[in-house]
Image (cartoon, rainbow, N blue to C red):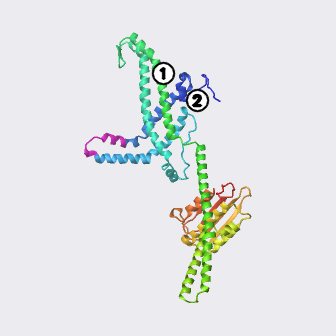
Amino acid sequence: MNTRIGSGARPDTLLRAMTGPRYLVTGWAWRALAYTLTTLMVGGVLLLVAAPIYAPWAIFVSMIGRDTSVAGYMVFTFVAGVAMVLFFAPLVAIPLGALERRRLRLVLPGPAGSGHRTPPPGLWGWVRTRYTEASTWREVAYAGVMAVGFGLALVLVGSLTTLTLVLAASPLILASDGEEYVSMGWTVLTSPAEAVPYALLSPLVLILLVYCCGALSYGHGVVARALLVGPPKEELYAELDQVTESRARLANAFEYERRRIERDLHDGAQQRLVALSMDLGMARVDLEEGSPADLRVAAAQVKVDDLIDELRELVRGIHPRVLSDRGLPAALAELADHTPVPVSLATDLPRRPPAHVEGTAYFVVAEALTNVYKHAGGEAVTVHAELRGDPRGETLVVEVTDQGHGGADPARGSGLTGMADRVAVMGGTMDLSSPVGGPTRIRVELPCTNDRPEAAK
């Protein structure tokens, strides 16, 4: 169904108001004038406040074209200008952006979020966040746009306002004593009678001024919205949902490939190696004990048995069968038995969590125990796993604590980053506490929801 807006309907944007016949009697004309006048005020204050920032650039431009004796000064002023922009321009641009987003509602109503992230507590957290996000440097770019807009508004408003006043007052000026002529630039008026037609043109110039302010305000507002306003929260949430779904699909694909590799190794290569070991054992029956052939076959059988053990360890590292058959407590117990460091295990799992939650928890504990005996030098480890909450909203909580030397840092490639990423894919959280000297505690919380898409079979 098409809806036709009548001629009496109020325009909802400045651009529609300017293209309509009633622009001069709408509130948009006054809003555009207010925006232009406040642009002059804000721009004037900006030029004063930002003078230390653009002063090196003004000096640098003034030196261009001179002899080479000032080359050193030019380099110095250029470096000083860059430093002022990098270090001090954000301090001016950030409050300017906040003010301009409020002022933008005069000509472009609508959501006007900043796009800034919430910084961590403390001064250093604020500096690190603000100086590294794109929103800040877009505001710095807008400060330059604001200076240009201030210049255009000053020239436009100043010239048209002056022209309107001169045209309107020209008959009075010529009628007063002592004034013989008024120069209009393109002509010279010498009597009030000659000035009257020009005075009648002053309302037209005033109308032109109002329309020019509207056009300038709309263009300025479009640029301001593009540079200062971040995407709506709904759009950010939608993008976050897409990223989360994409990570879940990648996790599902990995899970499917892991199961396929595990099945091929266990049911294929491992069974063939077992059969080969049995064949070698049967072949030794027909050989003379201690003969060279018997010794070579025996050595081959030992190698096959070692390869079977390595393959079993590989399959266990991918996904232990005991985890699928008997659940997380039995899998953690087996993992503790194979860990060189003494492990104290406590589990409180009245029911089995979903398979993807069990797999993630097992991976976290396995990686944590590996870090303990490879990096932490701990002499004892405590592993605790329990289900918290009711069956409708349970959370699997896993804690691994070791008495090592501490100082664990994800940036050093200890596997902690991979653990955190895998936990995040499942919608969980991971907390790490590892002061120098120990102990190190890893706490993981995994929501036990069954709404995770299953991998293709």
Span highlighted in magenta in the image: 56-70
Q: Tell me how far mark 1 sits from mark 2, CA to CA.
A: 21 Å
Residue type, numbered disc 2: Asp
- Residue plotted at (53% across, 87% down): 292
Viewer-side residue, 244 vs 123: 244
Picture coordinates of residue 108, whole percent (x, y): 54, 33
Counting from the top left corner in percent of width and height, residue 384 is at: 67, 67
Mark number displayed over residue 399: none
Secondary structure of the residue carrying tag 2 is loop
Overall secondary structure of the magenta stretch?
helix
User: Most extreme residue toward the front, as rendered?
Assistant: 286
Was residue 61 drawn as part of the magenta stretch in this picture? yes
Task: Indicate which disc residue 207 carries.
Answer: 1
Asked whether residue 306 is in view, the answer is: yes
In the displayed structure, does residue 398 sit left or right of residue 98?
right
Vertical order, 211 against 324 (above or below): above
The residue at 56%/24% (across/down) is 26
Q: Residue furthest top?
A: 193
Q: Which quadrant does the C terminus fall into? A: bottom right
**Residue marked by disc 2:** 12
**128, 450: nearer the viewer:** 450
Write down the quadrant of residue 301 in the picture: bottom right
Relative vertical location of residue 156 with respect to residue 417 in this rendering, above or below? above
Residue 424: in sight, yes or no?
no
Residue 366 locus on image (x, y percent)? 61, 68
**Which amino acid is tagged 1?**
Ile
Q: Alpha-carbon neighbours of circle 1 within 10 Å: few (<14), some, or many (≥20)?
A: few
